[in-house]
Image: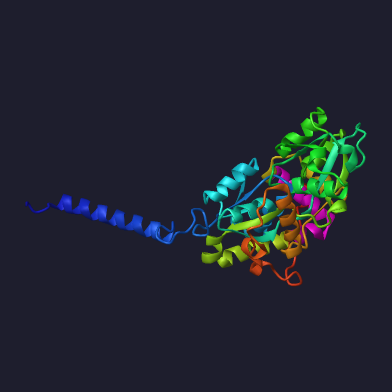
């Protein structure tokens, strides 16, 4: 075999160097040998999934305030258009943390998905809305009517089950229709359905535009109603506890900041609608103020009794089997002491930007 010349030696040396660099990058940054999630905290900014609804408002608020106070965000908020895409992104590992429907997260755990609920996204923040010209004034008036809910795993569907129980009715007395929340206002306007129920701001849109009338707000019939939760992959908990805690603490601080004053809520309506939701600010302004407790962002700890009620209704609705318990689908160790967590120390938008 002929000895290698200098050019060949240089080429082999460069190839070996590139291979070494690639292996180091894969091991240190991409977690090739540690089983870490793609997009998790191995990167500087991991992804958190959300939808443009008030149930997820603390996600963009946390990101925005972090950028205002520190110059950078601790995570990358990723907006999705619907629940199927949001769920699939989490299952694929694209978003190691996400805001998700509570019953959906619980059902995924029953199916063996390594998911844990670590905090709430909100309390209340939903409604049942009917056409303003209808003769529907109580639950019994919905007998034989078409009622739209987001999907079979939505807490709005369980809300209807609960209201039917209270009225001495069953699902056989109404026609449940699954419909994406953004389509609900138009369907109600066209009278294709008789009632709609989803997270805000879509219920508020029908009311604000003049053709919708609130039959009842969830806060009035199911106090401290939970629709969405903050969930993380167990890999995040195992390998990046500090990151998960930082995320939860940020959400908690944002919730306290939002509920601290109406000025803060109106500021959030401006920067979230324009920078994250692609909505007109007047819509968020309306649902965050009419009435002020329409949706709340404090008292977000994980309470067993709340989830056990969801378990019971979920089994009745046929979406939960009851094989996963509170300890299985939650991790309460990240829930901050409410007396210790303070609101973000940020005064809000300058007057010229309001």
213 in relation to 313, above or below: above
Q: Is residue 272 magenta?
A: yes
Query: Looking at the magenta stretch, what is its main secondary structure?
Result: helix
Q: Which residue is depicted at the point 88% across and 52% down?
A: 220
Q: Which residue is depicted at the point 83% across and 46% down?
A: 164
Left or right of 306 in this view: 38: left
Foreground residue, 236 or 26? 236
282 in relation to 327, above or below: above
Foreground residue, 26 or 93? 93
Residue 42: x, y in percent? 49, 59
Residue 305: x, y in percent? 76, 63
Residue 11: x, y in percent? 21, 50
Q: Residue furthest top?
A: 190
Q: Residue furthest left?
A: 1
Residue 339: x, y in percent? 76, 72
Q: Which residue is depicted at the point 73% across and 64% down?
A: 304
Q: Is residue 206 magenta?
A: no
User: Residue 259, located in which quarter of the rendered image?
Assistant: bottom right
Whether residue 347 is visible to the viewer of this picture, yes or no, is: no
311 in relation to 151, above or below: below
Whether residue 127 is visible to the viewer of this picture, yes or no, is: yes
Where does the magenta region start and end? 255-275
Q: How is the rendered protein coloured?
A: rainbow
Foreground residue, 51 or 149? 149
306 in relation to 203, above or below: below
Number of numbered tags placed on the structure image: 0
Left or right of 65 in this view: 26: left
């Amino acid at each position: 075999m002929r000895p290698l010349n200098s050019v060949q030696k240089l080429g082999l040396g460069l190839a070996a160097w590139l291979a070494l660099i690639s292996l180091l990058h894969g091991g240190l940054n991409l977690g090739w040998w540690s089983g870490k999630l793609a997009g998790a905290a191995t990167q500087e900014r991991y992804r958190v999934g959300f939808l443009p609804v008030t149930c997820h408002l603390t996600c963009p608020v946390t990101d925005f305030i972090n950028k205002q106070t520190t110059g950078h965000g601790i995570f990358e908020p990723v907006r999705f258009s619907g629940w199927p895409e949001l769920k699939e992104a989490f299952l694929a590992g694209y978003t190691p943390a996400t805001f998700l429907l509570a019953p959906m997260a619980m059902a995924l755990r029953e199916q063996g998905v390594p998911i844990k609920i670590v905090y709430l996204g909100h309390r209340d923040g939903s409604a049942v809305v009917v056409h303003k010209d209808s003769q529907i004034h109580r639950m019994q008036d919905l007998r034989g009517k078409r009622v739209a809910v987001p999907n079979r795993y939505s807490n709005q569907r369980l809300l209807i089950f609960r209201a039917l129980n209270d009225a001495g009715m069953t699902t056989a007395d109404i026609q449940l229709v699954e419909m994406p929340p953004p389509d609900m206002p138009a369907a109600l306007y066209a009278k294709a359905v008789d009632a709609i129920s989803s997270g805000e701001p879509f219920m508020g849109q029908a009311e604000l535009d003049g053709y919708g009338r609130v039959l009842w707000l969830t806060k009035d019939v199911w106090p401290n109603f939970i629709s969405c939760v903050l969930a993380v992959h167990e890999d995040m908990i195992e390998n990046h506890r500090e990151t998960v805690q930082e995320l939860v603490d940020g959400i908690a601080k944002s919730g306290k900041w939002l509920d601290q004053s109406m000025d803060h809520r109106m500021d959030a309506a401006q920067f979230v609608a324009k920078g994250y939701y692609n909505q007109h600010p007047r819509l968020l302004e309306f649902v965050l103020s009419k009435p002020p407790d329409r949706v709340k962002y404090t008292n977000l700890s994980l309470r067993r009794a709340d989830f056990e009620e969801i378990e019971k209704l979920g089994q009745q609705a046929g979406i939960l089997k009851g094989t996963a318990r509170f300890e299985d689908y939650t991790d309460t160790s990240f829930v901050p002491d409410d007396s210790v967590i303070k609101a973000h120390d940020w005064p809000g938008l300058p007057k010229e930007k309001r």
